Amino acid sequence: MISIEPIELQGHMYTAVTVHLPKTTLLTISNEIGYIMCGALDVELLNTRLADRKIIAGRAVGVKTIDELLKAPLESVTTEAEKMGIVKGMTGEEALLKMI
């Protein structure tokens, strides 16, 4: 099952997507600038092989719900995210609010 829902953070709109797969759940919250995602995100791939795309993204591990993704500290972020002031350790919500 896939669920898509709007999320508002301090007046800014984002899209939360939950994909239920066998034995795992994929989570992402995005806007037109970038996104945060669960542990399935390969930040190293984005920073190396896809570097020319300049993807702004962050990864939180151990999360099972959209609410947890918002509250969890980011375990890693892309180089492009760092350029926007998004750093490892900030919460998902803090990172999303920098993507405006």
Image: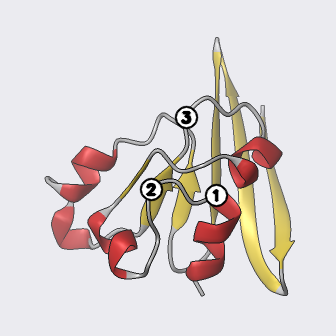
Give above or below for 28 relative to 34: above
Tell me which residue sits at (47%, 56%) in the image.
Answer: 58
Residue 27 is situated, as x and y percent measured from the top left of the image, at 65, 42
Q: Which residue is mark 1?
A: 91
For the C terminus, which image quadrant? bottom right
Examine the image and state in which quarter residue 50 appears. bottom left
User: Quick one: 95 or 31, which is closer to the camera?
Assistant: 95
Is 53 rendered above or below residue 17?
below
Q: Which of the 4 image quarters holds residue 36?
A: bottom right
Distance from disc 3 to disc 1, alpha carbons, whole Å, reads: 12 Å
Helix, strand, or loop for circle 1? loop
Residue 88 image label: 2
Q: Identify the residue at horizontal 70%, vertical 64% (top origin).
A: 93
Q: Secondary structure at mark 2?
A: loop
**Badge 1: residue crowd in 10 Å (few <14, some 14–19, many ≥20):** many
Disc number at residue 34?
Answer: none
Who is closer to the viewer here, 88 or 40?
88
Q: Residue tagged by mark 3?
A: 61
Could you tell whether 70 is left or right of 83 in the image? Answer: right
Query: Could you tell me the amino acid type at mark 2?
Result: Lys
Tell me the residue at 44%/64% (across/down).
Answer: 87
Mark 3, other Cα within 10 Å: few <14 / some 14–19 / many ≥20: some
Distance CA(mark 3)–CA(mark 2): 12 Å
3 vs 1, front mark: 1
Discs 3/2, front: 2
- The answer to whether residue 80 is left or right of residue 96 is left
Residue type pointed to by label 3: Val
